[in-house]
Amino acid sequence: MSNEPLSDDARHPLVAQSLDASLTANDVFRSREWYRDVLGFAVEREYERDGRVFAVAMRAGSIRILLTQDDGARGTRIKGEGFSLQITTPQDIDAFAARAKAAGATLDTEPATVFGARMFRVRDPDGFRFTISAPRERDASRS
């Protein structure tokens, strides 16, 4: 780090509006089906190169996920280790979890109330972890 004084712009925190994720999949078609059928994402766009689909943009509300096909150029890579993504929804978490299980998902955790929020955990076919939760009770009362 520099000992130089910070500029006015550097003193202010980031004002973020969204966070999108790009996930590398072993089988982009299998992942597309999983995100559509298990989590309810819609296909926004498929990207092709040389007549082959190499990426799929998925959307659910304001959340976007880009699924890209792992081409093996970097060797075998472990996916989904060391982080998880949280999706917050006003939907009934227990009903959402039941729908995910009916679509073939195996939940890492069953729905539970944790720190005032109803939530469950699930992994996609490549091991990427998601926490699906309702807003915290105190947060929901503010709206």
Image: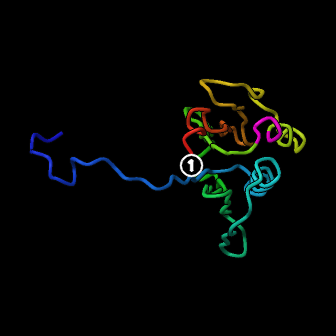
The answer to which of 117 and 120 lies nearer the viewer is 117
Q: Is residue 51 left or right of residue 64?
A: right
Span of residues in magenta:
92-96
* Residue behind mark 1: 74
- The image quadrant of residue 63 is bottom right
User: For the residue marked with disc 1, what is the amino acid?
Assistant: Arg
Q: Residue at x 62, y 32 (%)?
A: 137
Q: Is residue 14 left or right of residue 41?
A: left
The answer to which of 142 and 82 lies nearer the viewer is 142
Q: Residue furthest left?
A: 4
Q: Residue at x 61, y 50 (%)?
A: 23
Number of marks in the rendered image: 1
Q: Residue furthest bottom?
A: 51
Circle 1 sits in a helix, a strand or a loop, which is it? loop
Q: Residue furthest right?
A: 102
Q: Is residue 65 left or right of residue 17?
A: right
Q: Residue at x 60, y 45 (%)?
A: 75
